[in-house]
Amino acid sequence: MAIQEMVFSGEWSDDTSKERFILELDLKGVEAIWEDGAKIRGYINDELVEKIAFNDLANEFGLNLVWQPVQPGKWDVEGSNDQSEVILLDRCRIHTPEYRTDVEYEVELAISEQLSFGSGKHPSTQLCLEYLLKEEINEKYVLDIGTGSGILALMAARLGAARVVAFDNNPWAIGVAKYNQKLNEGGWVEFIEVGVDRFHSTLDFDLFLVNLNKQVFLSEEFLLPLSNLKKDGVVVVSGFMRKDEAAVTKRLEDKGLKPIDEAYREDWRLIVLTLAE
C-alpha cells in the first residue's frame, strides 16, 4: 500500500486560520499532521486520496500544495530537527529532543514535534499540562483518550501516576507516542491502537484526559468509556474555543457529566467535569 505525502506551504493570516485548516485535514482523513517549520505535512492512504478536494482546500486558504508518494516503511518518525522549548509554571520544560540547555527544571519532557496538537505549544495542550502539574497525580490511574503524540500521558507518568493507559485510532500517532516514550525515562505508559468504540479495560480510572477538537465532541459518534471512570473520578476536556464552549458543555452534560471547574488560555478552553448524581 502506497502513502501520499501532502506538503502545504504559504502564509497564514492568523493562528485561528491555521487551526481551522488543520482540523479540515483531520476531518478528511489525513494522518500524522505536523508542522515542519512554516510548512504543514500530512499523509494519506492512496485509496482515500481525492486530490481535487485537497487542491481546492489549499486554494481556499491561499496555500501551495505538493504531492509526493511515500512508502509506509520509510516514513521517518523522528520528523523535524527544530530546537525549541516551552516553559510551564516555572517548573516544567517541554522541549524537542535536539534542544540543549544548561538550565534544569523540576519536570522535563522531550517530545518530537510530529503532531500539531502534541508538541506542547498549542494553548489547549498547555492547559491540560498545567492541570496535571497543579493537581495531585501521584498513585492515580489515568486514561488518555486520543493520545496523539502521547504528551499528556507521558506527563502523567512522569508526575507519578500509578497506571497510565493511552489510546488512539491513528496508527501513526501511536508510533509517534511510543517513540516519545523512548525519549523519556521515568514512568511507563501503555499505548494502544484502538478507537473509543472498541476500547475495553477492566481498570477503573481516577482521571480521563480528553484533548480533542470541537468536531469530535459534537459528532454523533462521540463516546466516552464512563463505565471505566471511578464514581469520584474526574474528566478533563480541552481542544475547543470560547465560541464553542456552550455547545461542547451541553454535549458533555448529555453524556452524564457535570462541570466543576474551568480554565482559559487565549480563546481556548478547558473544562473539568465529574459524573452527575
Image (cartoon, grey):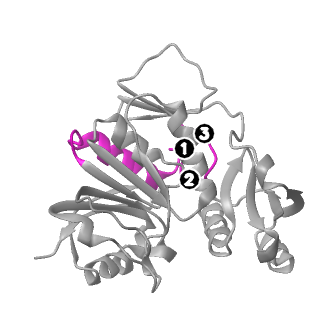
In this rendering, position of residue 50 left or right of residue 97: right
Rendered-image quadrant of the N terminus: bottom right
Q: Which residue is depicted at the point 65% across and 30% down?
A: 83
Q: Residues within 10 Å of mark 2 (few under 14, many from 20)?
A: many
Secondary structure character of the magenta stretch overall? loop
SS for tag 2?
Answer: helix
Residue farthest bottom in this picture = 220
Q: The disc labelled 3 sits on which kind of residue?
A: Ser
Q: The disc labelled 1 sits on which kind of residue?
A: Lys
How much space separates mark 2 and mark 1, taking CA atoms? Answer: 6 Å
Q: Is residue 222 above or below residue 137?
A: below
Q: Which residue is depicted at the point 77% across and 56% down?
A: 11
Q: Could you tell me if the residues under marks 2 and 1 are in contact, i.e. CB atoms within 8 Å?
A: yes
Q: Tell me the number on the disc at residue 178.
A: 1
Q: At which x and y percent is residue 178?
A: 54, 44
Q: Residues within 10 Å of mark 1 (few under 14, many from 20)?
A: some
Q: Tell me the number on the disc at residue 112.
A: 3
Q: Which residue is depicted at the point 60% across and 39% down?
A: 112
Q: The disc labelled 2 sits on which kind of residue?
A: Ile
Picture quadrant where residue 183 is located: top right
Disc 2: which residue: 174
How much space separates mark 2 and mark 3, taking CA atoms? Answer: 13 Å
Q: Could you tell me if the residues under marks 2 and 3 are in contact, i.e. CB atoms within 8 Å?
A: no
Q: Is residue 116 magenta?
A: yes
Q: Tell me the number on the disc at residue 49.
A: none
SS for tag 3?
Answer: loop
Q: Which residues are magenta?
A: 111-140
